[in-house]
Structures are given as structure tokens and as C-alpha cells.
Image (tube, rainbow, N blue to C red):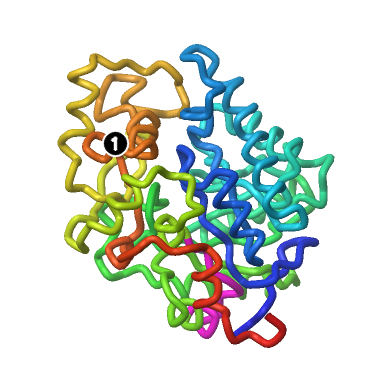
Amino acid sequence: MTQQLKIGKHIVRYPLIQGGMGARISAGRLAGHIARCGGVGLVAAAGIALNSGLYDGKNFFQAEIEAFKAELRKAYEIAPDGIIGVNVMVALSDYAPLVKAAIEGGAKVIVCGAGLPMGLPELTADHPDVALVPIVSSLRAAQLIVRKWQKAYHRLPDAVVVEDPDTAGGHLGEKMENIGIGEYDQYATIRSIKAFFRDECGADVPVIAAGGIWDRADVEHALAEGADGVQMASRFVCTEECDAEDGFKQFYIDCTKEDIGLLMSPAGLPGRAILKNIDNIRQYDLDHHTTCRMGCLKKCSYKESGERFCIVTALDRAQRGDVDTGLVFCGTNAWKADRITTVQAIFDELFGDIPGK
């Protein structure tokens, strides 16, 4: 198994990026421990202000910036020399300020999904050592990003994450009607993107497989199929180091395969979550007469018309342990969680016999 992963100027000991999980599921503690164990740890930007002690009900955007930097500091206290980065959704209203805050906070890698980060190099122009990693689900999306970046900024992505909408958790970059119909081939997509970089750009850019990666066999399969590394999120939820409350983790342990399904997010994207409490999520907003207080998304059906539910507060409730009315995002493998473990134990399972460990 390939031991290292090179993303821009950063050498990662093991070919693993921890997926970003918003509303403080992957905050400083989880990201720091992933980095300490030899992967890329990511602090997710979305909703980071909530449950931070910095949000007073009125200062959401300023609190987002302060909380984001605070979690990066926390991660670096755990792994001073680790490869620590961020996940910033393009769909966020404060996308650009959060990218700049990530740089100020010392992020070494910026991963962007939930939209195409066409202008990301401009936001990071003064910090060329920060690795830029878009998330895509198709060759076409990768081509659009690369051609814009080459023409406008004369640079390529430092890596690309290819997310499988049939298996990944959270927001998905595919139309609802195209998910789960058996037509998507993640590894064909990965190989085609690698060939595009090689043939049209004359570059060997790492391409990372995301979605459906749970155990050592999954990692080895991904690498054998042409991926340079894997991104894993759901597997790290049921760890002591995950930033979610115990009730959130127990919801994973208690769920079945049949509990996991798709919903339409107010962000206008499909999402994968544990759905057994789905009726209660919308009902909470109705019962409490909630309105959009934060405007966290550029486009949001709840903000615009009151349709569906307030997603960031639903995610926040779940993170605090209220899984009766909170939204619990997950990948298709979440039902496999059967106990609370540690980040180190997972790394030992995935990479334990690599020489030099």
C-alpha cells in the first residue's frame, strides 16, 4: 500500500484525508488527532460558530471567523507539525472570509465542495504554499475548474477529491434522480481525471477517492483502482476524539442500513443522513416558530420561503446530542459502527503493517 501522499508541498504520512463534517462534528479535536496520527485533519467551516461560546445570537459571521481560527489553534496544539486543513463549502454566504480566516489560522490545505470553487486561487494568491483541493463528482466539473484556474491564475489544483454520490455522506454534488441508479463509476471517474491532468496539463495531480471508504480493504481497493488516497469521514465519528456529543455517536451505533437515506437540503442539494427522525426536524422549526437568523447559505429555501427546515440549527442540535430533532448526516457505511474507538486504533487497522510505522 502506498505509504505517503503528496499534496502540493505537503507530504502526508498516510494517504488519508479526513472528510469535513460541518457544525462542529469535525472541529479542532478530531482534526488534530487525525493529523497527529499521520493523515490530513480538516476543520469544517460550516456552522463552526454554533456551540462555540462565541456566538451571541447576533454576531454569527464574526463568530464564525473567530471560532474557525480557535479550532485551528486547538488542532495545532494536538499536532504541532501535522498537516491540518479546512473544509469550506462554496455554498456558504461567508465562503470568502472563511477561506481568508483559514489562511490566517495556519491551514495548510483548503478543501472546497458544495459548488465549484472557481475563484479560490484569487483568495489565496498571497499564500502559494497553501494546497487547494476541490471536490468534484465528474470529469466535467474537474475540467471546468482546471481550465478556469489555468487561464485566470496559472495554477492547477494540488489534488482533487472525487466524491461518490452513491455512498458519501452530507451534501452531494449530483441530482437526486441520478443517485443510486447504478450508473456512477467512481474509479472510472478518478482514472479519467488523472488522465486529463496527465494528457492535457502534463501534470501528475493526486486524485482522492471519497465515499464508501470504511476499512482497510476499502482503502486497498481504492488505491488498486487508481486513487492516490482516500477521504474518510463517517468512520471517524464514533471515536473518542470526534467533536460531537455522545448522543450523536450513539445514533450511528444504533442505526441500521435501512435508516440511512437521501433528503433534499434547503441548500438545493441532495444529502445523505440517518432519516429515522426526519419528520421531527421540520416539526421543530414549526413548533418553535423559527426563522432564518443567520443567513449562513448563499442559496437556501428556508431562508427564502420557509420551505423545509433550518439546516444549520438542525445540524447544531444533533451535534449537541439532540438526535430526536437534529439532522445527522452520514455515509452509507455508518451502520457498520458498533463501538466507540480511537483515531489511533483506526489508523492502526488501516495502515498498521506499513514498514517504518
x and y percentages locating residue 187 in the rendered image: 47, 75
Residue closest to the far top: 58
Residue, x 58% and y 62% (percent of image)?
17
The mark total stands at 1
x and y percentages locating residue 186 in the rendered image: 43, 70
Residue 96 position by quadrant = top right
Is residue 176 toward the left or the right of residue 3 in the image? left
Question: For the N terminus, which image quadrant?
Answer: bottom right
x and y percentages locating residue 335 in the rendered image: 27, 63
Of 6 and 147, the residue lying toward us = 6
Residue, x 39% and y 43% (percent of image)?
245
x and y percentages locating residue 72 in the rendered image: 66, 42
Residue, x 70% and y 55% (percent of image)?
79
Is residue 233 toward the left or the right of residue 335 in the image? right
Local secondary structure at mark 1: loop
Residue 309 position by quadrant = top left
Q: Is residue 192 visible?
A: no
Of 227 and 179, the residue lying toward us = 227
Against 183, is 268 above or below?
above
Q: Is residue 161 visible?
A: yes
Instruction: Find the magenta span and give its range.
Output: 222-232
Task: Please say whether residue 224 is one of the residues in the magenta stretch.
Answer: yes
Of 177 and 269, the residue lying toward us = 269
Q: Which amino acid, mark 1?
A: Asp
Bin the neighbour count of mark 1 within 10 Å (Cα to Cα): few under 14, some 14-19, many 20 and up.
some
Residue, x 49% and y 63% (percent of image)?
342
Task: Please say whether residue 238 is one of the residues in the magenta stretch.
Answer: no
Against 97, is 116 above or below?
below
Of 224 and 145, the residue lying toward us = 224
Question: For the C terminus, which image quadrant?
Answer: bottom right
Q: Would you name the residue on which mark 1 appears? A: 322
